[in-house]
Image: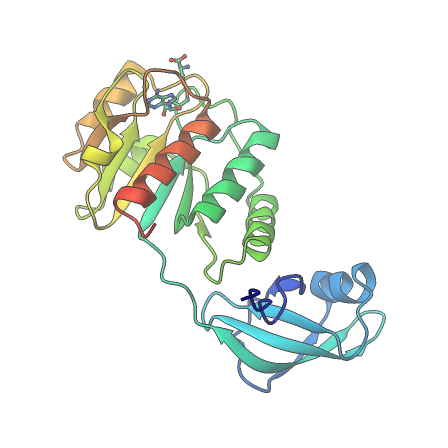
Amino acid sequence: MPATPAWPPNTLPRLHLAQPLAQDAHIILDGPPANYLGTVLRLKPGAQVKLFDDRTGEWLAEVATVERRAVTITITRHLRDREPVPDLWLLAAPIKKGRIDWLIEKACELGVARIVPVLTRRTIVDRLNHDRLHAHLVEAAEQCGRTALPELAELTPLDTLLRAWPTDRQLLFADETGGQPLPAAARRGPAAILIGPEGGFTPEERDSIRAIPQATGVTLGPRILRADTAMAAAVALWMAHAGDW
Ligand code: SAH
């Protein structure tokens, strides 16, 4: 039996809009969304697009008019509800520019609910362009079909996070000097995975993390992984054992 082609086709353009979407709504787009649909994709009236707003799920919409600076669309059909998202935070020390984009994209695809860039002693990046990173996150979510947008926190010092650690959230910190295997340590419920910078955690940082009652040091195997590889491995392991895979 030939597989029935997915409808609407996955090839339709997909856009995140920060405004709430509803059946039959007429939306006037300007700025980047209008430019993307009208100028980049050169869509004509009648063309279909998928929209999601990180609240009501995903909708099918039809282009009504295309002008130089504005595109109007009409929402025609609700396609999916907003996905349930496992309550997993990713705390990662920012790494070099190109790689942090990759890290953000993969965390988004893997289903992370919240990304917190963490400033640690050996973090080589001491400031982040939050808007640029957030735009990259939105693009990743648009491309990988997510209907829930991971939250991107501001760059936060490690000790600020540890001082106010939520009592109900398990903290799995990837410790390159050794720890429990992640699958054995991961428990269901609110969780966070902490990944250090290229230079690793300092001994003092390791002590202050281990001092948190909710924290468990976990190993990601006998080989040292790059921080972005460690993130992908840790999140995948968590999703498979305590998430929704
Ligand atoms: N400079 C350190 C390695 C840092 S790797 C050294 O050479 O020892 C960057 C981060 O990835 C680490 O802080 C840790 O959070 C994570 N990581 C890398 N390999 C790991 C492993 N085998 N087990 C657990 N965490 C690991």
Q: Nearer the viewer, residue 62 or 165?
A: 62
Horizontal side, residue 144 vs residue 188: left or right: right
Furthest residue in direction right, as rendered: 68
Horizontal side, residue 230 vs residue 218: left or right: right
If the picture is divided into quarters, which one holds ligand 1? top left
User: Which residue lies at the image location 39% right of the left edge and 16% below the top edge?
Assistant: 224
Q: Is residue 31 above or below residue 106?
A: below
The quarter of the displayed image where residue 218 is located = top left
Furthest residue in direction left, as rendered: 213
Horizontal side, residue 133 vs residue 189: left or right: right
| x then y, percent, for residue 215 | 20, 33
Q: Is residue 57 above or below residue 102?
A: below
Furthest residue in direction bottom, as rendered: 24
Furthest residue in direction front, as rendered: 1
| x then y, percent, for residue 223 | 38, 16
Is residue 132 something that shows in the picture? yes
| x then y, percent, for residue 194 | 34, 33
Horizontal side, residue 89 vs residue 97: left or right: left
Q: Nearer the viewer, residue 113 or 9?
A: 9
Q: Nearer the viewer, residue 9 or 163?
A: 9
User: Which residue lies at the image location 57% right of the left edge and 69% below the top edge?
Assistant: 4
User: Which residue lies at the image location 77% right of the left edge and 73% below the top edge?
Assistant: 70
In this picture the colour scheme is rainbow
Is residue 209 something that shows in the picture? no
| x then y, percent, for residue 233 | 39, 32
User: Which residue lies at the image location 43% right of the left edge and 16% below the top edge?
Assistant: 199
Q: Is residue 138 above or below residue 215?
A: below
The quarter of the displayed image where residue 37 is located = bottom right
